[in-house]
Image (cartoon, rainbow, N blue to C red):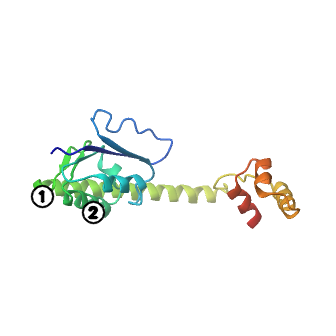
Amino acid sequence: MKGQNVGYIRVSSVSQNTERQLADVALDRVFTEKVSGKDTNRPELANCLNHVRDGDVLHVHSIDRMARNLKDLQNIIEQLTGKGVSVKFYKEHLTFEASAASPMQTLMLQMLGAFAEFERTLIKERQREGIEAAKAQGRKLGAPAKMTADQAAEIKARIEAGEEKSAVAKAYGISRPTLYKLLAA
């Protein structure tokens, strides 16, 4: 019996487009998510790993879409091939199968996985340097405050006067979690 062709598609943020990944591949099922690949705590990755069965082929655009950490990448590949699932990476032209483990493919996986991990480390380093430079220039980081100090005082007074929190939040156009943060401050 032939297995399913399953796709795993990942981009790092909601503003990124997933359409270019696996666009020309006929897939029976696709798992897509828009989250960082910094670790394996990704809901759709977990769903995908639980879904695939012996004889299935998991199609992934590139190694860095699967993992940004060499150890995680190796663990995922071992888990999948151990279940009898083949894993095909299109950008790198690599396929991993339990029955046809090749020392050259393993070496390529390790090298490319190490590059993906290195790239992730450089991204984090550049981000940290940018934050430090912005702080040194006196720029304020993070999202702008949703409320002025006067508005926060008004909100607290209205809540203390007995108004319902949901009504106050709605009146100021803020969410209840934002309201609770204001009240806690």
Residue lying at the far bottom in this picture: please name it.
184
Q: Where is residue 108 in the image (x, y as percent from the top left)?
A: 20, 53
User: Camera-side residue: 155 or 136?
Assistant: 155
Asked if residue 163 lies left or right of residue 177, the reply is right
Q: Is residue 21 positioned above or below 53 on the image?
A: above
Does residue 69 appear anywhere in the picture? yes
Mark 2 lies on a secondary structure that is helix
Of the image marks 1 and 2, the number of the one nearer the N terminus? 2
Mark 1 vs 2: CB contact within 8 A: no
Q: Quadrant of the C terminus?
A: bottom right
Instruction: Give the residue drawn at x 31%, y 38%.
Output: 22
User: For residue 104, which quarter of the picture?
Assistant: bottom left
Asked if residue 168 lies left or right of residue 93, the reply is right
Instruction: Give the residue drawn at x 41%, y 60%.
Output: 41
Instruction: Give the residue drawn at x 22%, y 48%.
Output: 56
Mark 1 lies on a secondary structure that is helix
User: Camera-side residue: 108 or 77?
Assistant: 77
User: Which amino acid type is marked by label 1?
Assistant: Pro
The residue that mark 2 highlights is 75
- Neighbor class of circle 1 (other Cα within 10 Å; few <14, some 14-19, many 20+) is few
Q: Quadrant of the N terminus?
A: top left
Give how far apart the Cα atoms at labels 1 and 2 are: 16 Å
User: Which amino acid type is marked by label 2?
Assistant: Asn
Asked if residue 56 lies left or right of residue 160, the reply is left
Q: Where is residue 101 in the image (x, y as percent from the top left)?
A: 12, 56
Foreground: disc 1 or disc 2: 2
The residue that mark 1 highlights is 103
Count of numbered marks? 2
